[in-house]
Image (cartoon, helix red, strand yellow):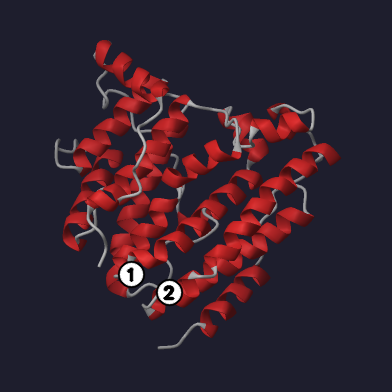
Amino acid sequence: MFPDSTSSVRAEPELPSVVTARAAASREGIDPWRAPDVSSGKGQADENFPVGSVLFAREMRAHVHAYYDFARFSDDVTDSDRLSPEEKVARLDAMEAIVRGGAQAPDRKDARSAARVREMLLRTGLPFEVATDLLIAFREDAVKSRYASQAELTRYCRYSANPVGRFLLGLHGESERTFAASDALCTSLQILNHLQDCKQDLLQLQRSYVPEDMLAAEGLTVEAVLGDVTTPALRRVFDRMLDETDRLNAISVGLLHRVRDRRMRMYCAAVVKLAHLLAAHLRAGDPLAGRVALTKADFARAALAALKNWKD
């Protein structure tokens, strides 16, 4: 059985800068819904790891889609260049209020996604925090653009990525015994995605998730990722980050021994395999010269890994 909300991933207060932005929004009387829809139009095809996997039972897929849509619309709010940080925090707070039942959803896409995820959580009995903990990371993105250390980045991943794994596991009736391996996998995937997109994140969003202390140790700043090729010094930084993902990927293999639901175990096997393959590609490739991505052959290997876990 999935734990109640007292066992959610939330354990730390939000950043002071989020609290400051929230206070400013309140002081200025910002209407969270006054700005237009900011949907990016992205879909599941834009993601590395499809969340609407055919490995999920048919009755589960609508729940997964509701969760994905909520995460996507929340992310669109955070990434919008049409909203101020204060407006972003206010909008995300308003979405959380809808999820928790403290407000009605106006007739707009992002609000409706919050209402749908509330309905799904009530129907499945999962805690609100598997959705609202994501908003901690999205609010952080609205006000924070640099990460001083791996510890700071790991904390961010705790909210930006780990709730996704816990949601899927809870949806399939898995126990807390699976959480440590799931958290490792989700954090690894998030870091790998940051490495893939390090140049685009800085150019388009003015954000860098490469730990500044690692860069400083090599005499670099975050602007080092704007080059056309990865320098030897920056390569060492990337390799240190990949050392961490390799450690996390090794832990994630534990999912294959702890997940009881057959379909979920197969899904985990596929994603664990993809995480290992993407880490290897980033170790050998250059994310500044071009996007380092998974290939059709990689997805075939992941499918084979899933089939190997078809067992009772």
Crowding around mark 2 (Cα neighbors within 10 Å: few <14, some 14 to 19, many 20+) is some
Q: Mark 2: which amino acid?
A: Arg
Number of other residues with Cα within 10 Å of mark 1, as a class: few under 14, some 14 to 19, many 20 or more: many
Residue 280 picture quarter: bottom right
Q: Is residue 92 left or right of residue 275?
A: left
Q: Nearer the viewer, residue 143 or 55?
A: 143
User: Residue 60: x percent and y percent?
Assistant: 30, 68
Which of the marked residues, 2 or 1, is nearer the chain's N terminus? 1
Q: Residue 281 lies in what quarter of the image?
A: bottom right
Q: Is residue 153 visible?
A: yes
Q: Quadrant of the C terminus?
A: bottom left
Point out residue 307 in the picture as x, y percentages from the top left corner. 52, 83
Q: Residue furthest top?
A: 28
| Residue 154 placement (x, y as % from top left) | 52, 43
Where is mark 2, residue-wise? Answer: 258
Amino acid residing under circle 1: Glu
Q: Is residue 39 visible?
A: no
For the residues bearing labels 2 and 1, Cβ distance under 8 angstroms: yes
Q: Nearer the viewer, residue 32 or 14?
A: 14
Residue 34: which numbered mark, if any? Answer: none
Q: Is residue 100 above or below residue 56?
A: above
| Element under disc 1 | loop
CA distance for labels 2 and 1: 9 Å
Query: What number is the disc on residue 174?
Result: 1
